[in-house]
Amino acid sequence: MNFQLTMRKNRGVIKIVTAQQVLEFMREKAYKPMTLQELEKHFEITGAAEFKEFVKLLNDLEQRGEILRTRSGDRYGVPERMNLLRGRLQTHPKGFGFLIPDDREHPDVYIHANDMLSAMNGDTVLVRITSKSAAGGRLEGEVVRILTRANTELVGTFESYESYGFVIVDDKRIVKDIFVPKEAMNGAVDGQKVVVRIVKYPEGRALAQGEIIEILGHKNDPGVDILSIIRKHRLPEAFPPDVMEEALQVPDTITEEDLKGRRDLRGLRIVTIDGEDAKDLDDAVHVERLPNGGYRLGVHIADVGYYVKENSKLDQEAYNRGCSVYLVDRVIPMLPHRLSNGICSLNPKVDRLTLSCVMEFDDKARLVNHDIFPSVIRTVERMTYTNVRKILTEDDPDHEQVMERYKDLVDDFRLMEELAMKLRAARMQRGAIDFDFPETKIYVDENGKPLQIVKKERSVAEQIIEEFMLAANETVAEHFFWLKVPFLYRIHEDPDSEKMMHFMQFISNLGYVVRGKGNRIHPRALQTLLEEIKDTREETVISTMMLRSMKQAKYDSESRGHFGLATEFYTHFTSPIRRYPDLVIHRIIREVLEGGGQLSEAREEYLAGRMQEIADHSSERERIAVEAERDTEALKKAEFMLDKIGEEFDGIISGVTSFGMFVELDNTVEGLIRLSYLTDDYYHFHEMHMALIGERTSKVYRIGDAVRVRVARVNMDEHTVEFDLVEAKRRPDVPHVITARSSRPAANGKGKKSGGKGNGERREKSGKGKKARK
């Protein structure tokens, strides 16, 4: 926010004092906290009106936590000069939390449950550093001020006590219930899912107080479970009337006027390849063999920015949503269906406006030339991953039938496979990390009851699109980086050195070594390790632990590189229907192309000022979408196991903690075997080996071990499953050097693995209906 103070000086000269000037002055090394009068003198404030505005400016900055008054209350300074940090609080169900500092270079700060000052998950707070362990280890601190509250409305289950009630909040990071007086119940009865608005935040031992503003229905009613998750994450559902009105004004067809300045590619054999149930087809591809033995690859992306104008109602709504959200039984789209499934979708055999990235590769798949331009295409076929796989897999029973149906395109798909496999080989050669954790598809009936959980394997068809999208995203990112225009990049920072050192110590206990030291390790070394452990007993344990050592990918206004992909330049260009950053990038690309390769000075300044804000907001919206998707998956997986209590299944140990071990079944359902239920021995948690070790028997349970379990309990409130151990399939290679010794509990608790890539994201176009998170 650009606060500013206008002051009229002698001879009619107007001087502007901005928030930035105040902050820069207070951040100077020589600055010592000043009183209001001293600041007034420094900035040459004269007159009552000017003084009043100056005080307002300081108050605004103080309210935002950008400046502080000393404890005596009469001197101003910036938090960082007072041993204070500003950031967002991330709490744990056990009560403690971490400060995620605004300063991205600063490490997180641990906050004990007794030092929260009634702050809640997501609040923006100021924290004082109270201790720092030796050798630059974990920082600890205490909340000294709550700047902004993140939670105004919460979802939970209502418990009635006649003259008052409580809301047991669904989000377990909100560790205390919300008290509701009788006059604020508004008709809610025991057992209903409700939305409660907080009217008074907690103070000391007093609970937060709220009023019921929406009754979703009884917690056991069909559909209430998913609706509760939607409300919990405050996901928007219906589009506002003004947004829908604007969407109705978007034309259904292409006119000659729309084609001006576009390259006509309607004569090329361009196809879309997506999942069977995909409706928003935002990318299409074509491949040609060049006379020199090389390849020409065209990646054509729907030109959504042509229809969604900057600062329009559609654009503002897309920004607020950030991305489409794919829940188990529904999609919450970023754009209205009229656009996403209509004029912006690259439907077969109709004209569509696109932005094209056409790349030329030599016979070893090395990029030798590229061109980025606005275009018009007409796809010749709407292909599915299934049918492309059947064409390229000769032993598939439907191979001949599908070959005949698409006989005019068979050679194109073979050429696509050839190029894609070379691109993948080159990517692996440079050191990209390629985890292969399968995704799942949960099928539900009309009432939302889960019927089936199916693993989605990555076939050659998904790999083709994945490689082509990766190539386009890298090419676009590097092209516009060198043009030095404001842009959005997808970055994946190097692993945390402490986590990576822990991982390297862990694998050394299993007889493996990775070259490198701390966060200076090259991703190629990690990929080499993954190849080395392929199909071994250690594959699951090592790949899971490696995954946990990675940071999450995010958006940034600067190109900081992508560790997991081992590339210096990467962006998100290929899904503007479903991701807001892609839409922004498309607008910049067309603006730069129309401006002859540059932007006006004013436009460049404006965009440069907005990029980081858009990056941070988009990253946050993506995190919310991921949490909502995981919540609905956990909910339906737990519900799927409800009628299977007492049944036995084979599984693999997927996590080991001080309180038990998590087991993942073949259908990807994960459940806990509590340590207290292992009655044959007293087991100790050995953190370095991530193993439970019997004190008397020396039995060892660790990640990757095969076990047989019985479903014991399903908790639908917590969305969790518990197992009893039936049989452990002993590993002949258990190292006997491990001794039964008590070890401190893991700080990260359960440590579940994330779905998808090692950078905490899903693959690029590994299946439509899921947002790409490369």
Image: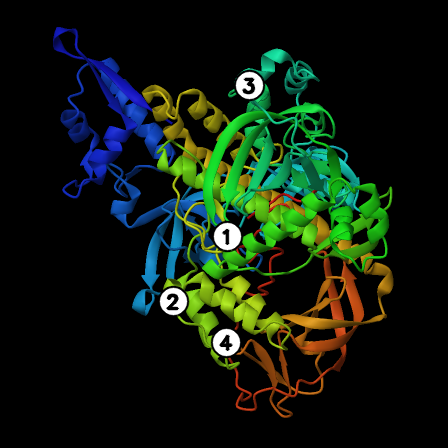
Residue 551 location, x and y as percent? 48, 56
Residue placed furthest toward the top: 11
Local crowd at mark 1 within 10 Å, few (<14), some, or many (≥20)?
many
Which structural element holds mark 1?
loop
Q: Sequence-wise, which precedes: disc 1 or disc 4?
A: 4
* Contact, mark 1 vs mark 2 (Cβ under 8 Å): no
Residue type for callout 2? Gly
Residue drawn at point x = 43 percent, y = 53 percent: 493
Q: Is residue 623 above or below residue 266?
A: below
Q: Name the kind of residue labelled 1 in the image.
A: Gln
Q: Which mark is residue 507?
A: 4
Q: Which residue is mark 1?
A: 552
Residue 676 rendering spot, x and y as whole percentages: 68, 77
Q: Within 10 angstroms of label 2, few (less than 14), some, or many (20 or more) residues?
A: some
First-in-chain label (2 vs 4):
4
Give the mark nearer the N terminus: 2 vs 3. 3
Please name the residue that numbered disc 2 is placed on: 518
Q: Which residue is mark 3?
A: 312
How far apart are the alpha carbons under marks 1 and 4? 22 Å
Give the image quarter of residue 703: bottom right
> Disc 2 versus disc 4: distance between alpha carbons?
14 Å
Q: Amino acid at mark 3?
A: Ser
Look at the numbered discs 1 and 3 and tell me whether their residues touch, using CB distance below 8 Å.
no
Foreground residue, 664 or 102? 664
Give whichever of discs 4 and 3 has the lower sequence position.
3
The x, y position of residue 604, in whole percent, is: 36, 25
Callouts 2 and 4 close, C-beta under 8 Å: no
- Image-quadrant location for residue 625: top right
Specify whether residue 195 is in view.
yes
Residue 372, which numbered label?
A: none
Q: CA distance from mark 2 to mark 3?
A: 47 Å
Q: Amino acid at mark 4?
A: Ile
